[in-house]
Image (tube, grey):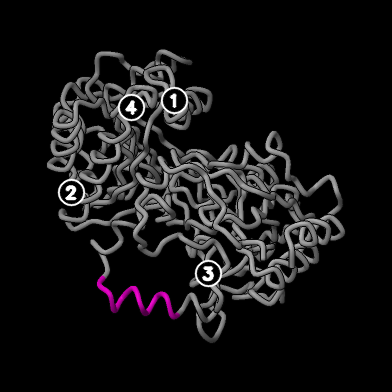
Amino acid sequence: MSRDVLIRELRQIVGDRYVLTEKEDVIVYEQDASILQVMPEVVVLPADVGQVSAVVRAARRANVPIVPRGSGTGLAGGAVPAEGGIVLCLARMNRILEIDLKNRVAVVEPGVINIDVTKAVTKQGFFYAPDPSSQAACSIGGNVANNSGGPHTLAYGVTTNHVLAVEAVLDDGQAVWLGGRVADSPGYDLCGLFVGSEGTMGIVTKAAVRLMRTREAVQTLLAVFDRMEPATQTVVDITAAGIIPAALEMMDQLTIEAVEKGKPVGYPRDAAAVLLIELEGVREHTERAARLAEEICSRNGARQVRRAQSEAERQLLWKGRKEAFGALGALAPNYYVQDGVVPRSRLPEIMREVAEIGSRYRLRIANVFHAGDGNLHPNILFDMRVPGELDRVIEAGAAIVKACVAAGGSLTGEHGIGLEKKAYIGLLFNDDDLEAMARMRRAFDPDGRFNPAKVFPTPITCAEMRRQPAKIPAGLWI
């Protein structure tokens, strides 16, 4: 099938308006929130599962890849069309189809924005727990693809703990439901396999997600430290004391500077680190836990520990944390986000190592991270216009990833492997492990057309991908 024939068929499926081929239209889809870029040749925006199935069948006949895309907030290059083909943007599929409060389930399309699920059930006393920092913009489909987490992962888990079932379009265009609307469906956990597969097994077109009851009481504390080490030690001590906060978040001085430069929320600008502690549950429990957390912070040298005295003050404290990534633009024109994980007990030493890496590569690194579950987000600040600076950024990012793995951690906690980290996946898995995963992928996608060049290692590293000119492989459309 020629390119022109494929484009004509795609337009018949979704309408002329929703097939984009002009450069000025497709350029906005050339990257996600990572630093990786490849210009798409065609972008298709389906409206329902029937159109998704028809697009997948057309792509199969033409033997072209399909790259699923949600809101484009991913941080590992997962939505970048590395090998050309069709970018299948699911943003139009943004309906909440069903809310079943009796069974605490909502059925949503993949383009639904994360925070909108909670907004739809807040007045009834429910919420959707996974809350990435980008929850005001990221889509449920993208969260499913990357098994996203968020500040409240410590208490509530990541996306896979809250997705009961998905409807997925497979390689032949067939739409199937994996999982069920009860907690423990019999048989293989194919839904669990699909969550976190980064679009390499099929296209999620619906998800049945778990809703939770709003907690009776919430206590939010801000602890201010003059040194990073006692702040990280406080995280270790709080969890060792048997307290499981709903969230335990940390920001360093550089991040505080960025937040307060933009929309100030009251973080002390001279602090080396602030710790945001949130406790939820029955009123008596949260009060006891808050007092104990205050004692631990003070014992570790916190110069101030304050509780939010109102919902407005609590939201203001969280506003600074949620908007921290965007605020970094006040400090540098570009930043590269890392997503390593380490055991909580190793936090003090890994933060020292991150600082040393920044010094070694002459780069500023702003840290904002989910301290409670050891999920680091070192943000390497840089200016892409400065010759040679991007090379140092990529090398520093690799050094951070390797340090996390060496400390007994992982390459990623929530952003996924994508293009960014596939060159390093061998640090965690041997060849037999990778082949077992590849066989599983081939069971769903035998031709390897769903989101190719992601997750598994290839000779192309993320640095090479970012610097090479965008090319569509010869003969791709034939």
* Mark 1 vs 3, N-terminal side: 3
**Which amino acid type corresponds to the residue marked 1 in the rendered image?**
Gly
- Disc 2 is placed on an element classified as helix
Q: Which residue is mark 1?
A: 320
Return the residue nearer the eye: 106 or 333. Answer: 333
In the displayed structure, does residue 31 sit left or right of residue 152? right
Q: CA distance from mark 3 to mark 4?
A: 34 Å
**Which amino acid type corresponds to the residue marked 4 in the rendered image?**
Leu
Q: Which residue is mark 3?
A: 194
- Disc 1 is placed on an element classified as helix
Residue 110 is situated, as x and y percent measured from the top left of the image, at: 66, 55
Helix, strand or loop for the magenta stretch, by majority: helix
Which quadrant of the figure has residue 30? top right
* Mark 3 vs 4, N-terminal side: 3
In the displayed structure, does residue 368 sit left or right of residue 294? right
**Residue located 25% across and 49% down the image:** 401
In the displayed structure, does residue 390 sit left or right of residue 144? left
Q: Which residue is mark 2?
A: 403
Task: Tell me which segment is drawn in magenta.
Answer: 430-439
Can residue 217 be seen in this snapshot? no
